[in-house]
Image (cartoon, helix red, strand yellow):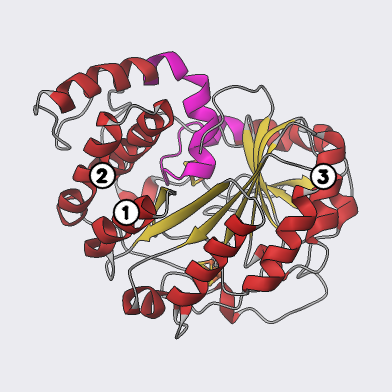
Amino acid sequence: MIPLFGRGYDVLVNVTNICDARCVMCNIWKNQEGPTSWLRPEMMRSVGPLTTVSFAGGEPFLHKEIVEIVRAVHGRNPRAKVVFSSNGFRTEPIVEKAGRILAFHKNVQVTISLDGVGEVHDRIRGIPGAWNKVNRTFDRLGEIGLKQRNFAFTITRDNHTALPAVYAHARSKGAGLSLAVAQSSKFLNVEIPPLEFEAVRPHLEPIILAHLKSRNPMDWMRAFFQFGVLRYLATRQRPIGCDALEHQFMIDQAGEVLCCHPLLLRAGNLGEADLPKILSCPAANELKKDLRACHACWEVCTARSAIRANLFRVGLWAAGNKILAHLGLWSGKKGSRLFPLTRERPPLNSQRPTPRESP
Ligand code: SF4
Ligand code: SF4
């Protein structure tokens, strides 16, 4: 889930804004295809150094040149971890493209969205038969030798009670489960009211406990990230500040370099300048200062680099909370002295910095 070492950037690359799902928590699928709907592979040549590159969209495997895009990234970043976030609907095209990528890059993870068991998943994703398609894709990816296969659950008002069942399903398949909270996003073109901590806590707490009790250090990292989800729901604050444009950023289908998908604040375009120039321009430097104070999300793609930079503190948290979990004393209601709130809870409408245009 989270590469623990590496000094490069983490980047989220939304290779298209076109999608074949109909999810309740996202309006991307309403986009019409246009001349800038598909990222051009050559845009990625100056992108690096990278620790993790997460390909998403839209549905990334709908992109006809997704293999060439990965190859362009691989040329400059042969050791970067490549993560795909896919809805998993088109089994054979996904398996065929993943197989071609595996032939030249082994460090690949495919994370498939799974928001409920059976009909619940079909309803959240708006596609009849989605549950069967997702499981078929997961199994077929295993058949071609893809070792890093995960599921991802997006917590919404409509499915939070399904979380334990999806976790059990993921475990039965030998897969990890990433979590995200459905939230407002300019890229996804959606406004979502905040979820209530007390609605989610009873369903998430047992999963954090299971991860804390696990012997796998990666599960302890997952537990910390999920603890961050709970704290975020309770306080609307990230446990670690944001390093958008400093250590992580987003690229969209038109080659725009942006802070992140919720805010879409622009630093430049890869068609006009190469990445080092964009990330060091005065507009980007001004944005970085503002974004350090932003608490508008706690998502895995924006938390990886912050967790890596605070690995010692996160490790201490995991050790202490693991002991509490084994003693039956751990509670998701408690905060952490290691990760105190950085300021008073702000009113929701003041959490986001004001958008500004770069020159
Ligand atoms: S949430 Fe993902 S799969 Fe669903 S419509 Fe949006 S981009 Fe597509
Ligand atoms: S905390 Fe704010 S700036 Fe950072 S990734 Fe989330 S929305 Fe973007």
- Cα distance between the residues tagged 2 and 3: 35 Å
Q: Position of residue 46 (x, y in %)?
A: 86, 39
| Residue type beneath disc 3 | Phe
Which of marks 2 and 1 precedes in the sequence? 1
Q: Is mark 2 within 8 Å of ligand 1?
A: no
Which of marks 3 and 2 precedes in the sequence? 3
**Which labelled disc corresponds to residue 30?**
none
- Residue drawn 10% across the image and 23% down it: 327
From the image, tell me which residue sits under label 2: 207
Q: Say what secondary structure mark 1 lies in.
A: helix
Q: Say what secondary structure mark 3 lies in.
A: loop
**Extreme-left residue of the structure:** 328
Q: Give the residues in magenta.
A: 288-314
Residue 1 magenta-highlighted: no
Q: Is 136 displayed left or right of 154 in the figure? A: right
**Which labelled disc corresponds to residue 104?**
3
| Residue type beneath disc 2 | Ile
Q: Position of residue 120 (x, y in %)?
A: 32, 75
